[in-house]
Amino acid sequence: MTEILIKRNAAKQQNLIYYFTGKPCGYGHIAKRKVVNGACFECALLGTKKWRSKSTEKLKAYNSKYKEVYRAGNKDKLKVLKQVSAANARAGGKIYCFQVHMLIKEQGGCCAGCLCKNNNLSVDHIIPVSKGGDNQLENIQMLCNSCNARKRDKMPEQWNALRASIIKDIFFSDNATKRRFPHHNHP
């Protein structure tokens, strides 16, 4: 590939990142240069390669520490990534993390099964993968772990019947009233 000859000042005016004069650098490389500092691209590349070869152990230690700190600070993100990866492996199509976050937001952070607010929602296929479901967004809902365990591989009709009894138990049982109004005296 031939480079177009351009001086540094002209490249700066055009907001370019690199420029090419056709003249060799101090080490004899005829290569493009950075507009910011005039550094030869080849020299910078060689310097990076040289530093990496000397600092392999240092880099490994840094990367290991970075991963450890990142994992500790991003447990929720990593959990979603793991669920998405597992769901993608099981069915055709792909689910992306932003779609999972969008679903959680659409559902108001509530489980689609029991309607309870929950910070620990997981990906569920409305029509189970084992029964022909796929990873299309229309076939995905967010359930709490309890509802997801109850639903298992049930089809929507079976799940809706079970779900009605779950909601009834949550909202209309004597214990539910006590949970919602703990400071009132109940007979």
Image (cartoon, grey):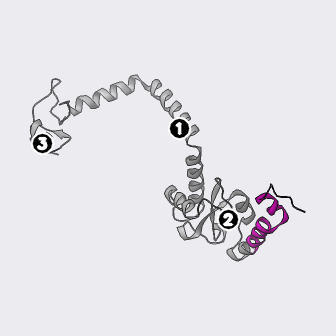
- Determine contact: label 1, label 2, CB under 8 Å: no
Question: Is residue 151 found inside the magenta-colored segment of the image?
Answer: no
Question: With respect to residue 62, does 187 lie above or below?
Answer: below
Mark 2: secondary structure: loop
Mark 1: secondary structure: helix
Amino acid on which the number 2 mark rests in the picture: Leu
Could you tell whether 186 is left or right of 123 in the image? right
Q: Which residue is mark 2?
A: 115
Amino acid on which the number 3 mark rests in the picture: Gln
Identify the residue at horizontal 58%, vertical 58% (top origin). Answer: 89
* Magenta segment: 161-181
Could you tell me residue 16's position as x and y percent?
A: 18, 43
Mark 3: secondary structure: helix
Q: Which residue is mark 1?
A: 70
Which is more N-terminal, label 1 or label 3?
3
Compute the Cα span from label 3 to label 2. 59 Å
Q: Residue 77 versus residue 110: which sits nearer the camera?
A: 110
Could you tell whether 68 is left or right of 162 in the image? left
Identify the residue at horizontal 50%, vertical 27% (top origin). Answer: 61
